[in-house]
């Protein structure tokens, strides 16, 4: 079942954001790799300032970052279909794509897959977790027709 995606785009980054159909494709592919997946996802694409504000508030880290994931936890006794929220910083995604020698679309796909996997409970704080998450990201992206996202 495809995810129900609420895509919100900040006015100052509209011209660099892929179409909603791409977000749908990438998110559905990532969600298919997750157990017990819920089917509602909010994605907000922002600029440097909003990303930096959220990064400081929720991670206590200075400056903008590529993607922030906010898994939703159902209140006690209430079951919802809400997976969570992703906050993606368009200028950071474009800057990283350039620095890594990737197309913008390749890196957008990677960041969306990465963020959805976080919402599914994957993490990369420990080496074993990172290896598992990176292998899954690579499989999903290659299956979508993109090159593998990590340096070999």
Image (cartoon, rainbow, N blue to C red):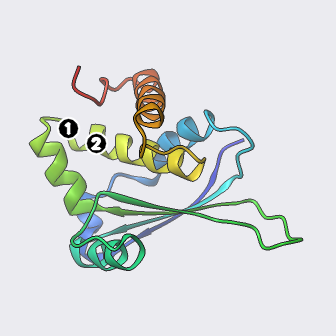
Residue under the image location 47 percent in, 41 percent down: 26
Q: CA distance from mark 1 to mark 2?
A: 7 Å
Q: Determine which residue is flagged by label 2.
A: 107
Count of numbered circles in the view = 2
Taking depth in this image into account, of 135 and 81 the one nearest to the observer is 135
Q: Of helix, strand and loop, which one carries label 2?
A: helix
Q: Position of residue 40 (x, y in %)?
A: 66, 58
Please tell me how crowded label 1 is: few (under 14), some (14-19), or many (20+) other residues with Cα within 10 Å.
Answer: few
Q: Residue 152: image x %, image y %?
A: 23, 19
- Along the horizontal axis of the image, is 116 left or right of 50? right
Residue 25: x and y in percent read: 50, 40
Q: Quadrant of residue 80?
A: bottom right
Judging depth in this view, the residue of 108 and 79 nearest the camera is 79
Disc 1 is placed on an element classified as: loop
- Residue drawn at x 51%, y 49% is 118
Residue 79's quadrant in the figure? Answer: bottom right
Q: Please rate how many residues cluster around mark 2, counting C-alpha atoms within 10 Å: few if below 14, some from 14 to 19, many from 20.
A: many
Q: Quick check: 64 above or below 108?
A: below
Residue contact between numbered discs 1 and 2, judged by CB atoms under 8 Å: yes
Is residue 97 or residue 12 the one in the foreground?
97
Tell me the quarter of the image containing the N terminus.
Answer: top right
Provide residue 136's location: percent of width, then percent of height.
48, 29
Identify the residue under disc 1: 103
Image check: 99 left or right of 59?
left
């Amino acid at each position: 079942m495809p995810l129900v995606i609420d895509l919100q785009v900040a006015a100052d980054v509209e011209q660099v954001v892929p179409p909603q159909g791409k977000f749908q494709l990438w998110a559905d592919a990532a969600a298919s790799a997750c157990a017990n997946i819920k089917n509602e996802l909010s994605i907000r694409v922002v600029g440097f300032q909003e990303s930096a504000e959220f990064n400081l508030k929720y991670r206590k880290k200075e400056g903008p970052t590529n993607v922030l994931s906010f898994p939703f936890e159902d209140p006690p006794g209430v079951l919802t279909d809400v997976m969570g929220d992703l906050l993606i910083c368009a200028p950071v995604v474009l800057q990283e794509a350039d620095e890594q020698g990737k197309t913008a679309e390749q890196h957008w796909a990677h960041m969306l897959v990465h963020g959805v996997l976080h919402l599914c409970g994957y993490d990369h704080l420990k080496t074993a977790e990172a290896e598992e998450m990176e292998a899954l990201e690579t499989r999903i992206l290659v299956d979508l027709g993109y090159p593998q996202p990590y340096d070999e």
